[in-house]
Structures are given as C-alpha cells and as structure tokens.
Amino acid sequence: MSDQLQHIYESISLLIPEFIVSISLLITVLLSLVSATNKYYLLKISALLAYGISIFAIIYQMPETPLVAFGGMLRIDRFSSYFKILFLIGGILGTWMYESKEKNSTAEYLLLIQAATLGSCLLSSSMNFIMVLLSLELISLSSYLLAGFSFNKQSSEGSLKYFLFGTVSTACMIYGLSILYGLAGTLDFSSEQFVKNLTTISSPLLLIGGVLTLAGLLFKISAVPFHLWAPDVYESAPTPVVAFISVVPKLAGVAMIAKFTLAINLFGQSGYNWQMILAVLSILSILIGNLSALSQKNAKRMLAYSSIAQAGFLLIGLVSFNLDGIHFMIFYSSVFLVMNFLVFHALNQFENHLGQLLITSFTGLGTSAIIPSLAALVGLVSLTGLPPTAGFIAKLFIFGSLWESYQQNSEWYLLSLFVIGLLNTVVSLFFYLKIPYYLFIKSKSAHDITIKINATGNLLSLILVMVLFYLFINPSGLMGWINKITFVQ
C-alpha cells in the first residue's frame, strides 16, 4: 500500500504543469462568481500567469530520460514536454487575443481554452489508449463549445457540424482501438507486449484497427478525408477561437500521430506499409487544401483550406519514419504556431472594424492600418514558405528529410510527395498573397477606414514577427534544443 501511495505521489509531482492549469481552471470558475469591477482583467491575468508558471515548471523538471506516471498511463519525456510548451504558448496567445464585447462570456471562454490546453498536454504524454480517448474528448468538447462563441445562427451551425463530424470520428476511433486491444491484449501501445503480439499477426484486422484509430487523430488535425468541418467552423467562429483551434488541437493530434504510427509500424516489422499510408494522406491534404483555397473569397475560409494543406506538410516530417524527420516536424510545428497566430491576430484586428472578412474588403487598407497589414504580410509569406521568414527554413527542413528518405528507400510515393509538395508551395502563392495584394497594391476604397489598434495588439504582432525573422536567421538555437529529443526508452 505504501508503495502505491509513493507511486501516486511521484506521478503527481511529474504532472505539476497540468495541475497548475487545473487549479487555474478552478480559479477561473471562482472568479466568475465574484462581482468585481475589473473581473475581466483579473480573469485574463490569472490565466496568463498559470500558463507562464507551467512553462517554467516544464523547463525546470525537463527529464533526461523518460519517466512514467500512473502505472504507464502517461510518460513524461522531452518530446511531450516540448509539445506541452507549445500548447501553453498557444493558450497564452489565445487568451491575449480575446477581446470580448460580451464581458460576461470571458470566464467561459478562458475556461474552455484552459480545458483544451490541459487536454492537449495530457494527450502529448499519453501512452495508453484509455488516456488517449479521455484527453481527446477533453480537447474536443471544449473545441465544440468554443466554435459557437459568436453566438449567432451561423456559428451555432458550424459548432453543430464540428460536433457531428467529431462524434463520428470518435466512434470510428473507439472501434479501431477495440480491435487493436483484442489483437494486442494490452492498451499500452508503447509496451513490449503490444509490439510482440502484433508482430506475429497477419490479419487484415490490424490494418482496419490502425486506420480507424488514425481516423480520430486525422480529424483533430483536419487532414483529408476528415477535413469537411474546417471551412464552416473557421468562417463562423470568432477569430481568436479559430487561431487557437487551428494550432493547439492540431499540434496535439500531430504529436499523437507521431507516437501512434511509430508504435503501429512495429519498429519496421509491420506487414503493412504505414509510410505509404501517411504519404498518400499527406498528398491528398496538400492537394485538396491548396486547390480549394484558390477559389475562396472569404479570408477565414481560405485559411481553413490552408490549414488542411498545412496538416499535409506537418505529416511530411512523419513520413520519413526517422528521428531527423520528427525533429524537423517539431521545428515546423513551432514555426506553424507562430505564423498562424500572427495571421489570425492581424485578421482579428481588421475584423473588429470591418465585420466580415471578404478578401476584397482589404482593398487599400495597407496605409490606414500599417502594423496589422505588415503583420499579415509577414505571416502569409511565412505560411507560403518564402525567405526571409522561418516558414522557408521549416519547409526546407521537412523537404530535406523527405528527400533523404527517398534516397534511402527509392519508393515512388516518397518522390510523388516531394514533387507535389514543392509544386503546391508555388500554388499557395496565388492565394496567400491575395490579401497583401489588396492591402498594398489595389487602389484605396471610396470610403477610407481609420483602424486604431491598441498597444497590446501591436506588441503581440511585433513579438511574433520578430520570432519569425529570428528563426530564419538563427534556426540552430531552437534545433539544438529539439535535437535532444529522443524516443529511446
């Protein structure tokens, strides 16, 4: 009994960042019940402090070797710790961006952001299928509610579609997990028993179970063919919400796909070609996302299809099935967080004054709103993958790892992904640069609009722009930290 209590105590000590976020969540609930003049600012400051303290706690207790908690349900290592930092930064940015006209809804918004961030942190550490499901549902339920935060008919419809698609994908995933559990005899997909039992099985049920499980994770990253919810949700949800759910849940899903595919591939002993499956999914996501974005007239809807394509680019780092590819995927994830939040933050500033974000509505606003216009330009150029931004370095890294993998294996699908990925980087120029074209090149609209941005909004734009330029000039600093991540037990 004493040994069990000692293990529980040690497990809790490994999850201090998650407990800080949980306590902050409770504080948010309590503060929402208090009548105070500055309650709106107290809620935001409380949440921001919790995220900041959690980041310092993660860095302070970063383990040299993997540590398990709660009987192997969770594993704390450098991989999960790094992604937790990304999720918490996403929580900070999502909280910072939110400026509600309805002050009464602030507590609920912050509560859901914290819950989704907590679920993402737990998912990145999960090594047991039960824990994966619980973490995913915490993220999903929070995201469904956040999607309806515009409190209008269109937002409610988008939230309902998100919920219905999510329910179906979760059902598929649960069925897939039940198949894998029946074949492996364990829920711990990192255990020797999981690998040993599945290595001896040639049944097509293994492929079916793996694909169905992957379906739930692909939905979370809005990859093809589980992307249909994204355009409606992105268009109808508040822009700070879109910025958050386009990054944090997506990166949480990518982190879990990395761990799950390494496990289901059985260290190269699987009878099924999971590398080809990921490559095909990546190709379809890039193609459908980019080609669909070309014809969009709404900026947020265009970025929804862009996000589908970005999911494909994130998967490229996993297709190589080697440590370098995963390292470059992590670097791409870091850059993706910064450039996506930068673009949506700029759009949020415009939306507060323009209302709906039709691409043509940006005409001539580059001179009346210089800082958000330049921020949008830098963010969109980075999403395209052009210098002198970190997006160029990120794409250079993942395509470099893909080319090395092709040289080693000479598989047709790797070359196809490489060529299609590069060609679609060119295609993306035609929609990413639409907004800068209308901002700076098209003539002014008949009615000039003066857009006043508060100091905190300009500060956030400046910080994110500087990060993108810095990572272009000196990517080795971040890569030096990422290169310490390993999957060795």
Image (cartoon, rainbow, N blue to C red):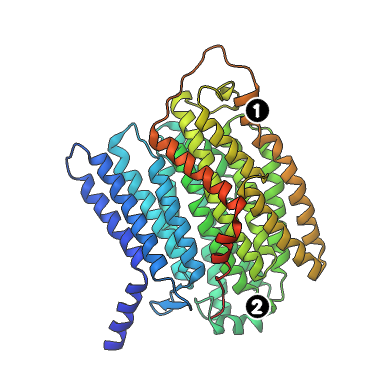
Percent x, y of residue 80? 48, 67
Q: Badge 2, how many Cα within 10 Å: few under 14, some, many 20+?
A: few
Mark positioned earlier in the residue sequence (2 or 1): 2
Callout in the foreground (2, 1):
1
Residue 239 vs residue 393: left or right?
Answer: left
Residue 299 vs residue 156: left or right?
Answer: right
Residue in the picture at 67% in, 45% down: 387
Q: Name the residue under label 1.
A: 437
Please, what is the three-letter code of the amino acid marked with disc 1?
Tyr
What kind of element bears circle 1?
helix
Q: Badge 1, how many Cα within 10 Å: few under 14, some, many 20+?
A: some
Q: Residue 238 carries which label?
A: none
Quarter containing the N terminus: bottom left
In the rendered view, would you say 106 is above or below 171? Answer: above
Name the residue at the front extreme.
Answer: 473
Please, what is the three-letter code of the amino acid marked with disc 2?
Phe
Residue in the picture at 60% in, 60% down: 476
For residue 282, what is the image quadrant?
A: bottom right
Q: Are marks 2 and 1 in contact (CB under 8 Å)?
A: no
Percent x, y of residue 403? 77, 62
What kind of element bears circle 2?
helix
Percent x, y of residue 177? 54, 69
In-front residue for pair 425/178? 425
Q: Which mark is residue 267?
A: 2
For residue 32, what is the image quadrant?
A: top left
Q: In the rendered image, is residue 448 in sight? A: yes
Residue in the picture at 70% in, 38% down: 429
In-front residue for pair 400/157? 400
